[in-house]
Every structure is written in C-alpha cells, then in structure tokens.
Image: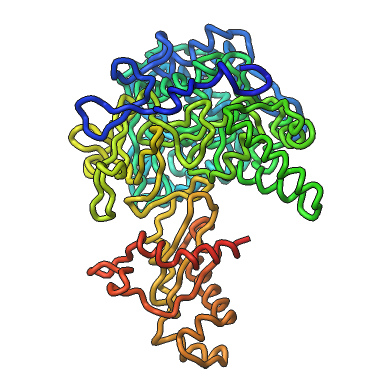
Amino acid sequence: MGAGGTKGKDTAPATKLARQSVEVKGDEYAKMSCHNQDGKLVDHYFDDVRTLHQAFMRGVGLNRNGPCLGWRPGVLAPYEWMTYHEVYTRAYNFGSGVVHKGLQPGTKTSMGIFSQNRPEWAIAEQGCNMFSIVVVPLYDTLGAEAVQHIINQAELRTVVCDVPAKVTKLLSYADGAADNILERIIVIEPITNEETLAQAEELGVEILTFNDVEQMGANNPQTKLPPKPEDLATICYTSGTTGTPKGALLTHSNLIACNSGILHACQRYLSFNKDDVHISYLPLAHMFERQALTLLFSVGAKVGFFTGDIKLLADDMMALKPTFFITVPRLLNRLYDRAWTLVQGSAFKTKMLHKALNAKKELLNKGICRNDTIWDTLIFRRARARTGGNVRFVAVGAAPLSEEVLTFARCLFGCTVLEGYGQTECAAAATTTMIGDYTTGHVGAPIQCTMIKLVDVPEMDYYAKQQKGEVCFKGPNVFQGYLKNPEKTAEALDSDGWLHTGDIGAWLPCGQLRIIDRKKDIFKLAQGEYIAPEKVENVYVRSPLVAQVFVHGVSIKSSLVAIVVPDPDVLPGWAKTNQSIEGDMETLCANKDIKDAIMADLNRMAKEGGLKSFEQVKQIHLHHKLFTTEDDLLTPTFKLKRPQARKYFAKELEEIYALVP
C-alpha cells in the first residue's frame, strides 16, 4: 500500500464487494467468505505456521537480529528493544527454568500470568509454548473469588505476577481459600516488603523473581517439547457475566486458524512485514491482543509496549510511531470527541472540520481512502500526529462502533480501518469488514476460517428464512468447550459443532452481517465490559423506594441508564415526610428533588451491593406506572421483556442518555 492510503489495486474489486459472502452448499442458511476456494475453510496462512511456537519461530527466522519487543524505561524515555534472538533466548531460559523447578512439559500443566502488558508477558508465554505448557491469563476485574476459582479449576500451581501488589493479592486470596493449591509465584519486579515474604513463607508459597527463573534455565537447559497443532494452547476465562467465569479451551490450531482468517482478509491488499510496528496496550489477558501479537511475530514485526498508563498512550504512540493499531471503540470515541471539543466555540474551525469530513466522505463513497489531501494537511495531520503519524492499518473490535465514529476514523487516518466481530470462543474473530468497503452499519463478512449461519429465534420473532436469527459460528477457530463444565459447553456448542453466540444478526444485500439484537441478556458497553443487567437490577430493587428497574446499555456508549418505577406504596408517604412534597405518582415522578433522592439511594445500593463502576447507572428516568403483562413489558411469569421495554421507553432512554456527561 502506498503512503497516500488505500485505493485502486489495494482494495477488493467491486464484484467482491457486492457479494461478500456466499451460501454454503448442503447447509441451509449458512454462509462463508466469497474468497473461500471450493467451499473449503482455511486453517493456516503460512505453511510453516501451525502453532503459536511456530509463528514466533518464523519471526525469528525472518528477523533474527532485528527488534522484537520494545519498552520505555521511563515516561519520557525513548523505546529500548530486544531482538528476536534475544527474546527467543530469554523465553527458552524462562521455560527451562520453570521446568527445572518442577513444572512438567506438556498440556497437562498450566501456568497463570497475572500481569499488565510488558515484554515479560510475551517472554513467559513463548517460554511456555516451547514446552507445551498451557497459559492461563488472570486479570484484576475478575475479583478475588473468581481468581481463586480459576487457580483451583485450572490447577495453577505457578503464577507469574508483574508487581508486588499483585503478589499480595494472590497471597490474600490463598490465605482465605479453604482449598488453595498455589505453590509458587514468579514476580517480575522484586518484592522489598518483608511482611509479604513472611506471609508467603507462612502459606508455603515459594517466591521467585523472573530473573531468577531465567538464570536457573540458563544454568539448567531443558529439552524443548514444542506443541502439536491439536494441543491446548490457552484457557481464556470470560469475565463480567453472572455466575462463575468459564474457561474457554483454545488449541494452537484454533488460534492459528483465526489468525489465518485475518491474514487472508488483509494480506492480499496489505503486506504486513518486519517494518511494521505495533503498540500493545489492550489487555493481553484477552484474545484480541494476543492474536495481534501472534500475527506480528509471524511476519517478524516490532511490538512496543505502552508504559502502563492509558492516559499517557498518546505520548507512547508519538514516541513509538506505530504502523499497526489495534483498538476498541472507546478510544476512537475519545479521538472523535476531542476533535469536536477542539473546535467548540469557533464557528470558523467548526465549519472547516465539517468541510474536511464531508470532502473525505465523498472520497470514501468513491472507494478512495487516502491521507494526502489538502484536508489532511489543514486538519487531520495534527490529530494523526498524536498517534505517531505512521498508522497504516487500524482494526477495531471488542464492542460495536457507531457508524459516525467509524467514518470519522477512516477520514482521520486515511488508511484501512477494519471493524471485526467475534468472541473468545472463536479465538477472537469471525468477521471483518472487507478492505475497500467503506459502508457502515455492519461488521463485515465471514473471515475465511469461519462459516456463519442464522438460526430461528421464534420468541423474538427472528427467522432465518427472513435473513435474521441467532448468529452461529463453525470452523477450525471454534473452541473445544469450557474447562470442566460440560453443561455450559453443551449450551454453547450444538451437536453439529455450531457455536451459538446469543447475538441476533441480519444479512445485508451485499453479504455483510449486521448485529441487531441480543438473545441473551448479557451485553457489552463501548469499553468492552460485559454487563448482566438482571444482576444489576437485582441490586437496585433492594432500595425501599423502588419497585421495578429496567437497566439499559448501548454498545456504543460507555455507561448504563435505567428506567425506574418507584414503589407506589412507599413513595407518596416518604416524599411527604422527607421532602415535604405531595401529589400522585405521576407528579412525584416528575419532581427533580424526588429523582435526585432516588438516584442517591440507588448509588447507596450499588455500593452496598458491590457493583463495579461500569455496572452502575449514570442517569435514570422515573416512570409512574408499574410494568405489567397488559402493556407487554412482563412475561406471564413476571420477567421483564427487554426488547419490548427498549421500544416502549425508546424516547425516554434517548433523553436520559443525552444527560449523561
């Protein structure tokens, strides 16, 4: 791709854009990519890459003495780099070290990584891969109970931590657990607190530094046991749902198949290579970022890690100058909001931004995306400089992106900006927008490793024959099931191997998939956090002032709102006694002081109920009538009908979202 952006030969031909997915013979309502040859799904891209270990070793072969992993030793310091050969040596030493300490090579052994993104994360993972040890990421938002559950279920006797604070957390979890099995913690930054070391000794948990383990391995090299494609690579636990986290079992072939789908989608138009640079800041505990690193390692590219503070990400990007930018809607939303904030108060600047966007939208409508127009010089170049100025590929996922912000991103970067869709259980991705397709309102077509079909959801009036239904995936990227959880596995995977997502999709005329609804109640906010609305509602209805609550979230928003029905038997008397306000329910619900008081009580309930910040509603509307079966808001068993509630309160929801800062 030339420096000017994406156009002409670098995009898919119009014939492909007009028919991006095709029907699968013999499987009614199933579709696959128009690029699949002879109706066959792909499971690899490079002939010599069938495992994560082979992907990394390919990079070593391509760029042995070239930069691999980069970091900033200080906030204002330039990036420093380790070569591919140096990373290989450290990974081999680390893997040898943990084997020397007693971890048995092979997929029956798992090791936890409880760390922010940094070089040692990748080194530890590659070290595990060399000996077929299964990697199990841990992360803060899981909570103490969930972390302890994962340690026990995945049989994590060894966990790598980045900082002493996380060691303290693990020790406190172990101390409070009746059946703790944790034996060893490997900490990257040394512990200086004697109390922590004493607590570890008391609990029988060995503390080692990362450097110690590497040195042990260097002194006691072990025979590698590289994984086979069918071997388990990782157990990735889902977060943010009600109940206990589920551990998705993903093999090397699952992960490489998904990676090949992305490479097949991109490499025919873009050539990822050793000159590419990636900024790693999205959590490596999730598959989206780990897949990005796998792809980049396989082409010998550079991966630079952010300093650890998302507020300093722009400074990191200006220092690193990435070409490859994997992001989430929340960050692009900030870029969009910042652009409009900067012109606020100036009619001239506002007019210029409008003109610039309209001019570049016209080019997009003609199939041209470039970054060398007069509007780039006048308007967009300065904004692009905050991302380093060299970005030539952007991929966004983890939650839906608004059409307006997606178009803005394409205008801003003037390069390929793809939106993907998938989930942990399909190794991250199942669809992506096709290069050259600058339309919005969809998540693209199936990638070449995945078939997608829609199945009937009669209770929601969605039918596959009408091109609508629950989205299901099938292909070599689909996971093996949930660890030690056959019941949940059977709910997710049917007898024919189709993974049921719980999302409702619709096929568009050109073969792209649009996500239109959610079969299950759980949904994501813009920052990628899962919300279980029923769980949140059950906390809020504990308020004595509240009878019913409908919690609502939009996947292009970062916060929740709610329709709240006050208790008609409680509110009138409470309002008279505590607020000196009288009136019927409609009058009381329209009163701002009443609304503020109920909001304050909901905040109290949220705190008492242990709701996380992203689970707390930021704005409410008081409704004066109880939800009933007669107005079709409740089922006969008095469960809330969410789709009907969204339609019924559409106006009110829009109004209160406008009030959220």
Q: Is residue 77 visible?
A: yes
Instruction: Quarter of the image for the C terminus: give it.
Output: bottom right
**Lateral position of residue 306 relative to residue 449, left or right:** right
Q: Position of residue 438 (x, y in %)?
A: 54, 33
The residue located at (33%, 27%) in the rendering is 22
The residue located at (36%, 50%) in the rendering is 518
Q: Position of residue 8 (x, y in %)?
A: 58, 19
Residue 184 vertical position relative to residue 526 in the rendered view, above or below:
above
Residue 422 vertical position relative to residue 149 in the rendered view, above or below:
above
The residue located at (57%, 14%) in the rendering is 273
Q: Position of residue 467 (x, y in %)?
A: 31, 41
Q: How many marks?
A: 0
Residue 404 vertical position relative to residue 386 in the rendered view, above or below:
below
Q: Nearer the viewer, residue 63 or 117?
A: 63
Q: Position of residue 334 (x, y in %)?
A: 64, 46
Q: Nearer the viewer, residue 333 or 65?
A: 333
**Lateral position of residue 190 relative to residue 150, left or right:** right
Instruction: Quarter of the image for the N terminus: give it.
Output: top right
Q: Is residue 214 visible?
A: no
Q: Nearer the viewer, residue 277 or 446?
A: 446
The residue located at (46%, 91%) in the rendering is 573
Q: Nearer the viewer, residue 618 or 633?
A: 633
